[in-house]
Image: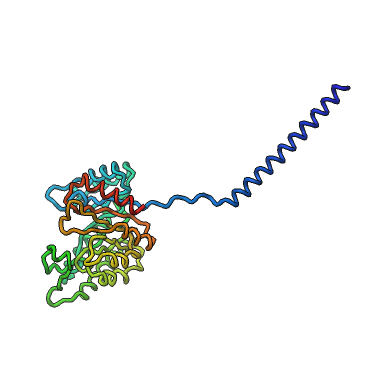
Amino acid sequence: MSFDSNKNHEGESRRTWLKTAALAGVAAMAGKRVNAAETPPAALPARRIPIAVSTYSYWHFGKDKYPVEKVIGDAAKLGFDGVEILHRQMDNETVPYMNKLKRLAFDNGLSLPLLSIHQSFVQPKAEDRKKDIEHTIKCIDMAVQMGIPAIRMNTGSWRTVKRDANYYKDGKEPPIEGYTDQDAIKWCIDAMGECLVAAEKAGVVLAIENHWGLSSNIDYLLEIYKPLASSPAMGMNVDTGNFVGDPYPQFERLAPYATIVQAKTYYGGGHYYDLDLDYKRIAGILRKASFKGYISLEMEGKEDAATAVPKSLKLFREVFS
């Protein structure tokens, strides 16, 4: 009898303890939920701006081309996010070669954000402009083959003055006799419009650049860009080094339209001209414009790329973080 009584007492005690423990657990969980609601979650780290390197950084149109494959390998070792391919630096235009570059970039965890090509629509003869339209459309197909989402576009220039130090200071280039800059602006709009038809079908962005010539005049560049901006394939590539006069107010005007930014450095002195660019100021302008795209390094100095490119990346990581 006493044994059964003790057993019942022990059972009752155990049930009481379990009930108390369960209630305490619920209260503790409720407290945690209340605290969690009162304490805001930790802020996520800011998204890092991706930085690519142009193959041009290793080859400034010299006699011997620096292989694109080697740039991809170098970029991976240094910690870049992507590689911009300069069309003229490619070894050839065959599908196996393009597939090789695409696979090499993929294996190294790199994107190929931009194919940088050349053309000029500042040509009075329609047949000459047509050739560069066809060249651009061919390059659109190449970009698709390599998985590249954007192409750098030029307006072109009159080619009436020598490209010397004075030209890069003032950018002045008079039209061919019998024509005006407004003629050239119309040619650019019409030709770009034809290219955009192919680009829209291919899903490739045509990013027009302030690349000297007609586009040295920022008003002209915007006059060409704005009528075409309704196309989902129209973009703008803003080059930090290609401004005549004070670059910062002009950069500030173009930054809201930027799809990609080419950022120049000049270690060892520039091949064509020198600029002392304030990249902290440039980064601030881009943040104000809510730019989130790629920064693509164009190291245009005479210093060996083996040392100048890492210096440039270090600078860009610091200011564009």
Taking the spot 24% from the left edge, 66% from the top edge, the residue there is: 246
Taking the spot 68% from the left edge, 40% from the top edge, the residue there is: 25
Front residue of 246 and 259 = 246
Give the quarter of the image for residue 79.
top left
Label count reads 0
Front residue of 315 and 257 = 315
Query: Whole-percent x and y of residue 6?
Result: 83, 25
Q: Is residue 157 above or below residue 110?
A: below
Front residue of 252 and 61 = 252
The chosen color scheme is: rainbow
Judged left or right of residue 13, residue 217 is left
Please, which residue is most extreme toward the right here? Answer: 1
Front residue of 27 and 276 = 276
Q: Is residue 281 above or below residue 10?
A: below
Query: Whole-percent x and y of residue 188?
Result: 24, 69
Judged left or right of residue 243, residue 160 is left
Query: Whole-percent x and y of residue 149?
Result: 32, 55
Give the quarter of the image for residue 4.
top right
Query: Whole-percent x and y of residue 110?
Result: 32, 46
Quadrant showing the N terminus: top right
Please, which residue is most extreme toward the bottom here? Answer: 178
Give the quarter of the image for residue 72.
top left
